[in-house]
Image: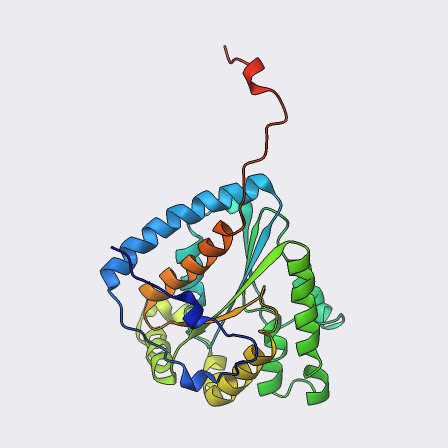
Amino acid sequence: MNIDINTENHRIKPNEPIHLNAIPTTIEYDKKLAKEQFKKQSKELTHLQELMYAEAKHAVLIILQAMDAGGKDSTVRHIMTPINPQGCRVLNFKSPSAYELERDYLWRIHQHVPPRGCFSVFNRSHYEDVVTVNVNNLAPKDVWKKRFDHINAFEQLLTDEGTHVLKFFLHISKDYQRDRLQRRLDRTDKHWKFDPSDLVARNHFEDYMDAYSNAFNLCSCNSDAPWYVIPAENRAYRNLAIIKIITDKLASLGMKYPEPKYDVSQYQID
C-alpha cells in the first residue's frame, strides 16, 4: 500500500499567484507508511541516477530554499545519502565573498551547475539575491527587481541545455521555527548550529513570506523549472514528496544505458 501523493498540489503554477500564508505547513499522512515508501523511492532514485550518469545526456539541479531551521540540511541528508557521490555535489550559498561581489550575482551560481550525468543540490541559491537582498535592503529596488527576468532567462538557458531544474521551498510556520531554534539552544549537540543572525531574520518572518511569495509568482513561468512548496513540518512526508518529484522527473526522461563501444561477445575473461 502506498501513500497517494499528488505532487501537482505542491507545484506553483504559472499565472496562478499564491501567498505562502495561505498554504498549509503540515499535512495528514501515515508516518510509518511514508517511511516504507521512501525506502522504495530511494532504491528507484539510485537506479535512475546510475542510468543518468551512464547516459550522460541530462543533468538535474535541485534548489532548496527555506526559512532558518526549515530543514534544508536534513532534506539533503535523507534524499541524497543513497546516491553515488561521484554523480552529486552539494553547494551551500551563504553571503557572497568580496571576490564574488566584484562579479555579477549569477557568476558564483553558474559555475556550479551540474555537468551532464550529474546532480547538483543548492542549499540556498540565486534566490537569495531577490529575497534576502529585498528584505534586508541590500540593494536598491530597481536593481533587484530586474533580477527576476535574469533568473528566468538563466533557468531557461539551463533547461534548454539539458539541465532539469527542480526548486523546493520547505514551508514551515513561525511557531515551528521557534521550537526548532529553541532546540538548538536546549541541546548541547545542537549549539554549533545556532547563529544569532537567525533571530534577526526571524523578526522579519512575514517580510520573508511576502518576498518568497513574490519570487515564486514571478519565477514559475518556466514550466520546466517549477517551484514546489512542500509542507515541511512533517519530515517523513517532506522527504517522500521531494524524492517522488525527483524520481518522477527522471523516469519521464526515457533514459537508456548507452550501447557498448565494443562487441562484448568477442571478449572472455580468463
Residue 253 % position (x, y): 54, 50
Query: Is 259 located above or below residue 238 in the figure?
Result: above
**Residue closest to the far top:** 270
Give me the residue at 50% from left, 81% from top: 197
Give me the residue at 62% from left, 22% from top: 262
Locate the N terminus by quadrant: bottom left
Query: Is 110 located above or below residue 115 in the figure?
Result: below
Residue 42 % position (x, y): 38, 50
**Is residue 97 in view from this perspective?**
no
Query: Is 224 located above or below residue 132 in the figure?
Result: above
Give me the residue at 36% from left, 82% from top: 178
Residue 53 % position (x, y): 56, 43
- Which quadrant of the structure image shows residue 28? bottom left
Q: Is residue 39 left or right of residue 118?
A: left
Give me the residue at 41% from left, 69% from top: 71
Q: Who is closer to the viewer here, 79 or 184? A: 79
Q: Is residue 170 left or right of residue 37?
A: right
